[in-house]
Amino acid sequence: MRNSEIQKPPSPSKWIIAFTVILPTFIEVMDTSVVNVSLPHIQGSLNAGVDEVTWVLTSYLVSNAIVIPITGWLASLFGRRNYLLFSIILFTLSSILCGAAPSLEVLIIARILQGLGGGGLQPLSQAILLETFPRREHGMAMAIFGMGVVFAPILGPVVGGWITDNWSWRWVFYINIPAGILAVILTLSFIFDPPYIRRKLVSIDYWGLALLSIGLGCLQVVLDKGEREDWFNSNFIVTLSVISIVSLIAFVIVELKTEHPVVNLRILKDRTFIFGNIIMFTGFFCIFGSIVLLPLYLQNLMGYTAFWAGLVLGPGGIASLMVMPIVGQLIRRGIQPKLLLSLGLILTTCSLFQMAHFNLDADFISVSIPRIILGFGVGMFFVPLGAASYVNIRVEDMGQATGIFNLLRNLGGSFGTAFSTTILSQRSQFHQHMLIEHITPFNPIFQERFHAIMNFIGGEHLSWIQQQQGLSLFYREILRHAGMLAFNDTFWVLGWMTGWLVLLALLMKGPRKPIIMGAAH
C-alpha cells in the first residue's frame, strides 16, 4: 500500500469534524420519524391500503437494522471515509427516488435503499467523534452526538407535518438533498481515515451476513407487525419469530468461530461494555415506550389535538438539549460518568412513576412536568452512558463497538414500542372487564352516576332512544377509565424496569489504565 493512502493530512478542528458527521446523522435519524405523519397522504396519493403503506416505515427499519452492526466491518473493508461518503450519497440519491416514486412498490424499494445508506451513519459518526475528541472529552463528544440523536426524532414529526400540509409528502424526502450535498462536500474536505484503518481484502463472512440479515429482518417485521397481527395467535408472526431466533443463535455461533467475522462479538468480553449495552437496550426500551404512550394518553383520553400534545412533548426535548452539554463538561472535569448516569436513571424512573399516577382530571401543567423531568433524565442518560461504555474499547475496535451499541439502541426502541402498546391493549381489556362486572342495576354508585347522566340529557322522563344514548355515554366513560388504568399500569412497569438499571450502572468500572489528561487516547 502506498504511503499516500495511509498518510493523514493535518487534522482539522474537532468542531468542524463534529459538525460534518452530525449533519448527515441528524437527517437520517429525523427521517425515521418524519414520514410517520405523512402516511395518510402517501396512502391516498399512491392508492394503497393501511397495511400496505406501513411497509414504507417497516422496509426502512429492516434495512437500517441490518446495516448498523456490520458498519465497522464495512469501514475496515472499504475505508471509513469511502464508506461514509457512499452512505451519504446512497441516502441522498434514494431520497430523490422516494420523492419521485410513481407507485408504492417503487417507494418501498427506495426506502430499503435509503435504510441501507442511512444505517451506517450513526455508528460511523459516533466512532469518528470518539476518535477525534481526547478520551477525557468523550463526554462532550457524546453530548454532541446525543443532541442530534435526541432532538431529531422530536423535530421530525413537526417538520414532516408542516411540509406535508403546506407542500407535499414528496418534499419530506426532497429536503434531504441539500443536507446530503453539503455533507458530501464536508466529508471530502475534513474526514480522513486514521492510519490503522487500511483497506484489506479478507474472506467475506457470507454465512454471518446471511444469518444476520435474515434474523434482524424477521425480528424487525415481528416487532412492527406483532400487535396488529395479534402476536403469536398469527402463524405469520410465529413463523418469522422462529426464523429470527434460529438465525440469530446460529449467527452468534458462526461469528465466534469465524476468523474474520462480520461482527466482532469478542469485544463483548469487556464487562463495562456489556453492562453499557444492557443499560442502553433496557433504557431506550423504557424511554421510547413512554414517549409513544404519552401522546396516545393525551389525544385519546384527554382530547388534546396533535399540536397541544406536541407542546407537552416539546419542553422535554428542550430539557435534554440543555442538560447534555452540561453533563459533557462535568465528565470532562472528572465527574465519574456512572454517577451521572445513575442520577439520570433515577430522574427517568421518578418521571415514569409520576406518569403512572396520571388521571382523567390532569391539567396541562400536571402532564408537562413529568415529561420535562424525563427530558432531564434522558440528557443525563445518553451522554455518560456512551462515555462510560467505550472506556476500555481499543480505537481499532471502535467501529465494531459503535455498531453493536447503536443496534441495541434501535432494537431497544422497537421492543419498547411493541411491549408498551401490547401491555396497554391487554390491560385495557382487563380493566374494562373488571369495571363492567360492577355495572348492575343493584349497584348504588352505578344508579347515582346513571341518573346524573339522564338529568344532564334532559330530565327523568326520557324516551327509550334517549336512555340508550345515556347508556352509550356511560359505556364510553367506562372505556376512558379502563384506558386510564391501563396507561397507569404500563407506566408503572416501565418505571420499575428503569429503576433496577441504577444498580447495574453503579457496577460499571472505569478504565483499566489511568488516562493521562491531555492524551488523545
Image: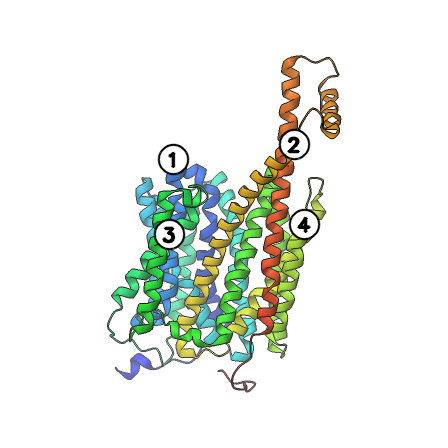
Residue matched to label 2: 477
Q: What's the residue at 25%, 65% (across, down)? A: 206
Q: CA distance from mark 3 to mark 1?
A: 25 Å
Q: CA distance from mark 4 to mark 2?
A: 24 Å
Position of 75 relative to 171 (above/below): below
Q: Earlier in the sequence, mark 1 or mark 2?
A: 1
Mark 1: few, some, or many residues within 10 Å (few <14, many ≥20)?
Answer: few
Mark 4: few, some, or many residues within 10 Å (few <14, many ≥20)?
Answer: some
Q: Answer yes or no: do the residues labelled 3 and 1 have beta carbons within 8 Å?
A: no
Residue matched to label 3: 241
- Residue 230's spot in the image, x, y percent? 44, 42
Going by the image, does 455 lie left or right of 292?
right
What amino acid does circle 3 point to? Ser
Mark 3: few, some, or many residues within 10 Å (few <14, many ≥20)?
Answer: many
Q: CA distance from mark 1 to mark 2?
A: 32 Å
Asked if residue 12 shows in the view, the reply is no
Position of 493 relative to 38 (above/below): below
Q: Nearer the viewer, mark 3 or mark 4?
A: 3
Residue matched to label 1: 49
- Residue 187's spot in the image, x, y percent? 39, 68
Q: Nearer the viewer, mark 3 or mark 1?
A: 3
Q: What's the residue at 41%, 47% (across, down)? A: 57
Position of 303 relative to 406 (above/below): above
What amino acid does circle 2 point to? Glu
Secondary structure beneath dot 3 equals helix
Q: Earlier in the sequence, mark 3 or mark 2?
A: 3
Say the numbered circle drawn on residue 368. Answer: 4
Say the numbered circle drawn on residue 38. Answer: none
Q: CA distance from mark 3 to mark 2?
A: 38 Å
Q: Nearer the viewer, mark 1 or mark 2?
A: 2
